[in-house]
Amino acid sequence: MTGRLRVGVIGAGIADLHLEAYAELRHLFAVPVLCSLDEARSRALCERHRIADYSQDYDAVLARGDLDVVDIATPPHTHFALARKAIAAGCHVICEKPLFGSLAEVDAMEKILAGTDRRVMPIFQFRFGRGIQKLKRLVDLGLAGEPFLTTVETHWWRDAGYYAADWRGKWATELGGALLTQAIHAHDMLNLIHGPFAEVFAAAATRVNPIEVEDCLSLAVRMTNGSLAALSVTLGSRKEISRLRFCFRDLVAESNTEPYGFSRDPWRFVAGDERHQRRIDEALAAFIPAREGYARQFELFHAALASGGPLPVTLADARQSLALVTAAYHSTRTGRPAALPIGEDHPLYRSWLPERA
């Protein structure tokens, strides 16, 4: 039986939201140490969340020997090396998005884990909003019907202040732009509801800020299940919205437009006739609400370790997400549609970074 898990949190930015979730789940998790190079921010987090120890030495944190889990919430280019060290130290790993910087690294981690009993869970906390979970329930019950088209809008605003952090906006450290960093959660909803991607045709531009990576994109996607998707991303929208709209033969599901709360309620579920609408409404009435976001993902992570069951988000899920990214970058550079799945023979399998990076 798995008791209360001891977590070492690495990073002091988005990690604040992780710490709030662990506090909500204090019966399942304890956080004895925070590790980050940003001392001022880290000290404040330690005080706010009552974390006993602060360190700038990752190796020393791993050498403590009292941690069950390492939670990596650092800039993207550090993720793989930190995760590999944590596994070698005998810890499970939770890792923020984007998980790693290539499909090759995801596959390498699969091989590393194969020789251990440790597990790695990528972060995709938006999967656990009640709105998207209601849609998943309807699809699983067979009430949605044949999928036709999905539209996904990630229209946010980022100005020079956001890029004041020296690792942002650069290929070598952020590993990509709006496609990889801002839109990755909304695009993961396609994977959650429709499964794998089959083909991507993408165009990208850098128009909003003087950065290396893209901040505007449009993508036309063909899913393996035959449905199509139109994805638009910009960091130049003064009115920030996120919106998902799923069109099925028997149902249209539409999210709210909150930029950072689009997977939560309220969602609209509209059937083609009154009789089917009653079926939809009855299925939704039987929906049992659970925690959302990070707290729900971490709660399910604990349950998976206790039972030996599947993780709530897997390396395979992260691989699908990064396959979309890889294909999209390939398409933007070739001017042609890019096919999936992507294997070792693909020119961007080991890295999608441009040569100049």
Image (spheres, grey):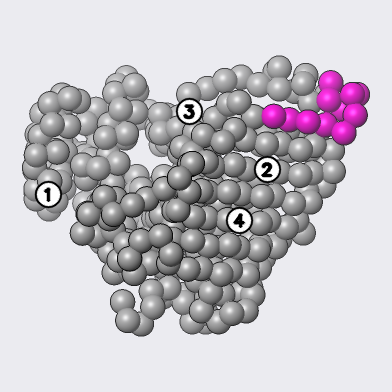
The three-letter code of the residue at mark 4 reads Leu
Kindly identify the residue that appears in the image at 25 percent across and 42 percent down. Answer: 13
Q: Is residue 15 magenta?
A: no
- Going from N to C along the chain, the mark reached first, 4 or 1, is 1
Q: Nearer the viewer, mark 2 or mark 1?
A: 2
Disc 2 from disc 1: Cα separation: 41 Å
Q: Label for residue 240?
A: none
Q: Earlier in the sequence, mark 2 or mark 4?
A: 4
Give the mark nearest the N terminus, 3 or 2. Answer: 2
The answer, for residue 126, to whether it is visible in the render is: no
How would you rate the neighbour count of disc 4 (Cα within 10 Å): few for under 14, some for 14-19, many for 20 or more?
A: some
Q: Residues within 10 Å of mark 3 (few under 14, many from 20)?
A: many
Badge 1 crowding class, 10 Å Cα cut-off, few under 14, some 14 to 19, many 20 or more, is some
Q: Secondary structure at mark 1?
A: loop
Q: Position of residue 183 (x, y in %)?
A: 49, 52
Question: Left or right of 65: which side holds 84?
Answer: right
Distance in Å between CA atoms under marks 1 and 3:
30 Å
Q: Nearer the viewer, mark 4 or mark 1?
A: 4
Which region of the structure is painted magenta? 268-278
Instruction: Return the residue at label 3.
Output: 292
Identify residue for label 1. Answer: 37
Inspect the image, locate mark 3, and give the three-letter code of the amino acid beneath it: Glu
- Residue 83 located left or right of residue 246: left
Residue that numbered label 2 is attached to: 245
Q: Secondary structure at mark 2?
A: strand
Q: In the figure, residue 257 lies in which quadrant?
A: top right
**Tag shown at residue 231:** 4
